[in-house]
Amino acid sequence: MPGAYATVRFHITQPVSSLTVPSGSVLYQASGPQVATVTSQNTILLKKVTVGRDFGDSVEVTSGISANDAVVSSPPDYLIDGMRADIQNAAAGQN
């Protein structure tokens, strides 16, 4: 009807906590989106994630990783769980 309107209210029971990671860090594979993380033993651990909003150069991850996880920023497609990771300190190359 012309001139009609409605009032809508959304009741959200709990806030959605999310993290933002670089777009290139998400691996889209047959088993679903995954993020490669580095364990304390410097090995790769692939974690299945739920992707939220896409911001272009970064994406929102709503579940699957925590703020304490060390995420691989640009992983190759051939990574598998348990592969050895060589950690490079980004600050070491800066003067």
Image: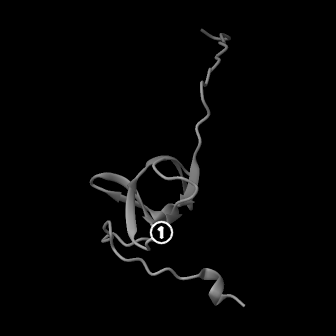
In the current view of this chain or complex, which residue is farthest to the front? 41
The answer to whether residue 42 is above or below residue 62 is below
Rendered residue at 68%/11% (across/down): 3
In the current view of this chain or complex, which residue is farthest to the left? 30
Provide the residue designation for mark 1. Answer: 40
Residue 76 seen anywhere in this rendered image of the structure? yes
Residue 17: image quadrant is top right
Residue 56 seen anywhere in this rendered image of the structure? no
Rendered residue at 62%/20% (across/down): 11
Image coloring type: one colour
The quarter in which the C terminus is drawn is bottom right
Question: Does residue 42 appear to the left or right of 94 in the view shown?
Answer: left
The answer to whether residue 36 is above or below residue 52 is below
Which one is nearer the viewer's eye here, 68 or 8?
A: 68
Rendered residue at 30%/71% (across/down): 78
How many numbered marks have been drawn onto this rendered protein structure?
A: 1
Question: Does residue 91 appear to the left or right of 88 in the view shown?
Answer: right
**Spot occupied by residue 85 in the image (x, y as percentages of width and height):** 42, 77
**Spot occupied by residue 93 in the image (x, y as percentages of width and height):** 63, 89
The quarter in which the N terminus is drawn is top right
Question: Does residue 88 appear to the left or right of 29 in the view shown?
Answer: right
